[in-house]
Image: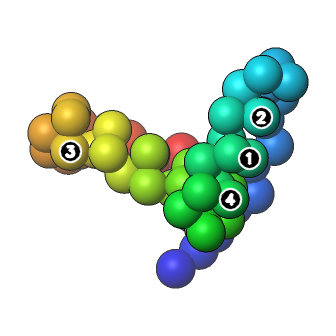
Amino acid sequence: MNQKQLCIRIPDHELKILDHYARKTRRTKTDIVRELIRSLESKEGSMENIEPS
């Protein structure tokens, strides 16, 4: 699997939410973000129409 790195800017209060959730669930922030991205795939249905970048 080819992996890319992503750098995002978010407000302090959103980072605090993510930090709190990560501690509460004993997971990494990366794992949580990946899960949220995957949930978008299921909400959108088939991802066949998305062109690779």
Please rate how many residues cluster around mark 2, counting C-alpha atoms within 10 Å: few if below 14, some from 14 to 19, many from 20.
Answer: few
Q: Is residue 34 above or below residue 20?
A: below
Among the two numbered marks 4 and 3 on one chain, the one whose residue lies closer to the N terminus: 4
Tell me the kind of residue under disc 1.
Asp
Q: Which residue has dot 1 on it? A: 19
Q: Which mark is on residue 11?
A: none
Q: Which residue has dot 3 on it? A: 42
Q: Position of residue 32 (x, y in %)?
A: 54, 55
- Quarter-wise, where is residue 35 in the image? bottom left
Q: Kindly indicate whether the residue at mark 4 contacts the one at mark 1 (C-beta within 8 angstroms).
A: yes
Among the two numbered marks 4 and 2 on one chain, the one whose residue lies closer to the N terminus: 2
Is label 4 in a helix, a strand or a loop? helix
Please rate how many residues cluster around mark 1, counting C-alpha atoms within 10 Å: few if below 14, some from 14 to 19, many from 20.
Answer: some
- Quarter-wise, where is residue 45 in the image? top left
Q: Separation of disc 3 and disc 2 at Cα?
A: 27 Å
Q: Which residue has dot 4 on it? A: 23
Instruction: Please state which of residues 43 and 13 is positioned toward the viewer in this rendering.
Output: 13
Q: Which residue is at 32% across, 45% downward?
A: 39
Q: Which residue has dot 2 on it? A: 16
Tell me the kind of residue under disc 3.
Ser
Q: Kindly indicate whether the residue at mark 1 contacts the one at mark 2 (C-beta within 8 angstroms).
A: yes
